[in-house]
Image (tube, rainbow, N blue to C red):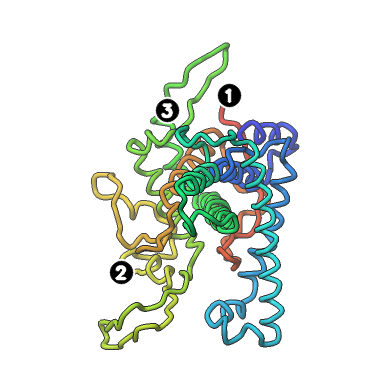
Amino acid sequence: MFAKIDLSIDRSENNEINLAEFVEHSIASIVNQFLFGVKFDEKNAADFYEIKQMMDEHSGEVGGHSLFWMYILWPDLLRNVPWFRGKRLQLEERVANFHRYFEKRIFERQAKMENPINLEKPSSDYVEAYLKEKARRDALGENGHQFESTYQLGMMCFDLWITGQETVVSVLNWGIALLLNNGEPLAKMCEEIDQLISSETVTEGRRRRRMITVADKAHLPYTCAVTNEILRCANIAPQNFIRTVASDVRLANGFVLRRGTCILPQISVVLCDERVFPEPEKFNPDRFLDGNGKLRRYDQLIPFSIGKRQCMGESMARMELFLFIANIFSRYKVSAGSVPPSLKRIPSAVTHCAPFTCRIEKRMKF
């Protein structure tokens, strides 16, 4: 990613670029390698742009109209009502297209596996691990096991792609936009990073700065606080997924939620609770530090939801957010472009910020 950004800077007349394009491609490559063991490069660029277009259209369709959420709430009631029926058919066709795309990728990955499959050899990606488990259970003569369906594997790839790519890209874009609109936290974060890796080495007459790693988190509490505040302010999933009450629940005000009632928890209510986060509308990473400058934990910081349906990719998403933010602002001096990033929220399957460009300068030769 950085090599491509450097090249774009060299070719730009005013060093103003759309950083989101590079972030999106890099995150997509990480997800694709996790699923299929293959990064996106020049050889398979067409695959990246194909899935990107499909995801963009799907995200805009699902979140682009408030009435669509009514169908999510009452699918059986509205499935054949005019307008809703058309949207349902469009959605079903999009899901079918996703399945065809991922089924093709699965068969390509399967063709590269050893024949016969070596069940003892460690798997290098998710699809390989799934297919090996399927082969193992087939060899044992198990019938109707949960790994039997390739369709299920395709839909799992679809779910993992949406949650692993679109959400992380959106959070990173929000993070950059928020920092460019809040100069003081940005300066404090960069100063902390500089103090940690100030001992650059000189090789062949050029100063070199090492990459920030996960091991550095313990020494970068303010940077960690910044990423926490980004997650809180970005709030890309203000509405949780629908839940069904498993048993009667009496709330503190005496109201009873009867068993079987559908509820739609509001994550935004918790993330913006001024009793926990004073002046919640302000971007203030210091709220996540205690009096000794140590990172403070808040149980109310739940951008990935809570409970059994909590996002299983939370740890990976947090790691990516920390590494991308820390290394981008370590390597480059980033400032607002000719038009500062807007913080207006754009509703979709996840909440996006408006596209923006930023001015980027290399902080040193690498």
* Percent of width and height locating residue 133: 48, 46
What SS does tag 1 mark?
loop
Circles 2 and 3: CB atoms closer than 8 Å:
no
The quarter of the rendered structure image containing the C terminus is top right
Q: Earlier in the sequence, mark 1 or mark 3?
A: 3
Classify 10 Å Cα crowding around label 1: few (below 14), some (14-19), many (20 and above). some
Q: Which mark is residue 203?
A: none
* Percent of width and height locating residue 49: 72, 49
Which amino acid type corresponds to the residue marked 2 in the rendered image? Arg
Decide: is 218 above or below 265. above
Q: Residue tagged by mark 1?
A: 366
In this rendered view, identify the residue nearer to me: 262 or 299: 262
Q: Residue tagged by mark 2?
A: 275
Circles 1 and 2: CB atoms closer than 8 Å:
no
Instruction: Indicate the quadrant where residue 191 lies.
Output: top left
Which amino acid type corresponds to the residue marked 1 in the rendered image? Phe
Which amino acid type corresponds to the residue marked 3 in the rendered image? Ile
Classify 10 Å Cα crowding around label 3: few (below 14), some (14-19), many (20 and above). some
In this rendered view, identify the residue nearer to me: 331 or 165: 165
Decide: is 126 above or below 71. above
Residue at 62% over, 54% down: 340
Q: Is residue 205 left or right of residue 284?
A: right
The quarter of the rendered structure image containing the N terminus is top right
Q: Residue tagged by mark 3?
A: 197
